[in-house]
Image (tube, helix red, strand yellow):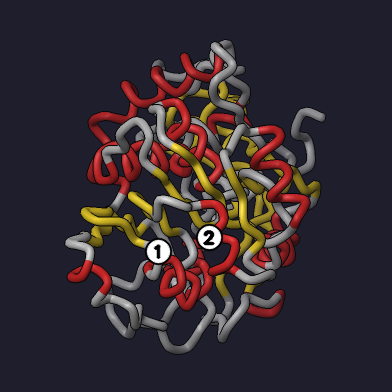
């Protein structure tokens, strides 16, 4: 091919919120395909707060992302050439070796998707890792019962919005915590949450008003002092699910919960999980979520930002500033409009 391939590489380990000069755009020729290779033109890059956790200098040879390596953002796109019988030109796929316009792989990291079931953007959001995180975290660890109250932080984000909707599907009450009145209105009016609290107002008062019977399940994506406040409202035998800690990823020191004795007082438990432990169950979960979406019970929402691979750091800053509703994706040149 004659096209050039823009790639984004890690140039420095960020101190705090990632800045443009922590990354470097490199331009290379698109390599020729070998036997068994697949060429993908990437249409979207996934913007996830947890990606930041791998840009830390551990000093170990197990370093997740080393300086000079491709940024480890999830990508999705279209197969435009293939020497691999498992993939045909025109197939839509997710996966690849990192953030770049074109990916050449042996296909082992690619997942072919069914665009008749849902568009590529939904596969990278509600049916992707974020949606699966919501599904398994809530259902396997939280095990919501009809009538119980589920509180989810980062509720207007990619994971949180799915958590609340699944809670409702299972007959539980869903209360979301978000960072603006617009997002709270989105949760209640469009997604059917039973209540929403703007944490920039009086968080505890808002929780008292929306959780009169206290909280049975906490699905936490934010961590920090917010989680401390929520733990003051735990109900007996409640479950606190640790999914992420967005508020802490750019901080030099992690804030640990100070109200942890609430777990003893209310005979509650706090449990974390890693989504990849459920890999053998992904297909079944996606089929169920796609079924809910078809029935109108589950809504997927994405925030798309147009740009090049070099715009990835700026879009990530937008994510940390709370400028997204639902899954945030960087839409690359050549992607369908």
Left or right placement of residue 314 versus residue 284 in this view? right
- 258 relative to 176, above or below: below
Residue carrying label 2: 207
**What residue sits 21% from the left and 60% below the top?**
269
Left or right placement of residue 122 versus residue 307 in this view? left
Left or right placement of residue 243 versus residue 306 in this view? left
- Could you say where residue 47 lies in the image, as x and y percent from the top left? 60, 53
- Could you say where residue 125 lies in the image, as x and y percent from the top left? 55, 38
**What residue sits 41% from the left and 24% below the top?**
286
Classify the position of the N terminus by image quarter.
Answer: top right
- 67 relative to 220, above or below: below
Q: Is mark 1 on a helix, strand or loop?
A: loop
Give the class, few, some or many, for how many residues have Cα within 10 Å of label 1's Cα (few <14, many ≥20).
Answer: many
Residue carrying label 1: 233
Residue 51's tag is none
**What residue sits 58% from the left and 83% below the top?**
16
| Res. 238 visible in picture | yes
Q: In which quadrant of the rendered view does residue 79 lie?
A: top right
**What residue sits 55% from the left and 52% below the top?**
210
> Sequence-wise, which precedes: disc 2 or disc 1?
2
How many numbered circles does the render carry?
Answer: 2
């Amino acid at each position: 091919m004659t096209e050039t391939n823009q790639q984004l590489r890690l140039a420095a380990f960020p101190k705090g919120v990632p800045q443009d000069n922590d990354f470097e755009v490199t331009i290379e020729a698109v390599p020729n395909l070998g036997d068994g290779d697949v060429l993908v033109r990437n249409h979207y890059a996934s913007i996830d707060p947890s990606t930041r956790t791998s840009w830390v200098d551990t000093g170990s040879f197990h370093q997740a992302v080393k300086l000079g390596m491709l940024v480890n953002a999830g990508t999705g796109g279209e197969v435009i050439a293939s020497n691999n019988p498992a993939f045909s030109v025109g197939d839509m796929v997710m996966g690849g070796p990192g953030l770049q316009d074109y990916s050449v792989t042996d296909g082992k990291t690619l997942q072919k998707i069914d665009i008749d079931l849902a568009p590529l953007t939904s596969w990278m959001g509600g049916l992707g890792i974020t949606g699966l995180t919501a599904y398994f975290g809530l259902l396997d660890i939280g095990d919501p019962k009809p009538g119980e109250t589920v509180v989810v932080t980062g509720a207007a984000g990619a994971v949180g919005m799915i958590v609340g909707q699944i809670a409702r599907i299972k007959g539980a009450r869903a209360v979301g915590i978000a960072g603006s009145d617009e997002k709270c209105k989105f949760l209640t009016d469009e997604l059917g949450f039973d209540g929403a609290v703007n944490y920039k107002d009086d968080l505890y008062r808002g929780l008292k008003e929306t959780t009169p019977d206290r909280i049975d399940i906490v699905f936490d994506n934010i961590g920090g002092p917010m989680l401390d406040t929520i733990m003051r409202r735990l109900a007996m035998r409640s479950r606190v699910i640790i999914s992420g800690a967005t508020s802490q990823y750019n901080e030099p020191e992690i804030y640990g919960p100070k109200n942890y004795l609430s777990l003893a007082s209310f005979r509650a438990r706090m449990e974390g999980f890693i989504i990849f432990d459920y890999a053998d169950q992904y297909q079944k979960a996606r089929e169920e979520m796609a079924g809910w979406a078809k029935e109108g019970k589950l809504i997927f929402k994405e925030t798309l930002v147009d740009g090049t691979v070099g715009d990835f750091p700026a879009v990530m800053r937008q994510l940390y500033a709370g400028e997204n509703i639902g899954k945030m994706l960087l839409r690359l040149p050549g992607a369908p409009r």
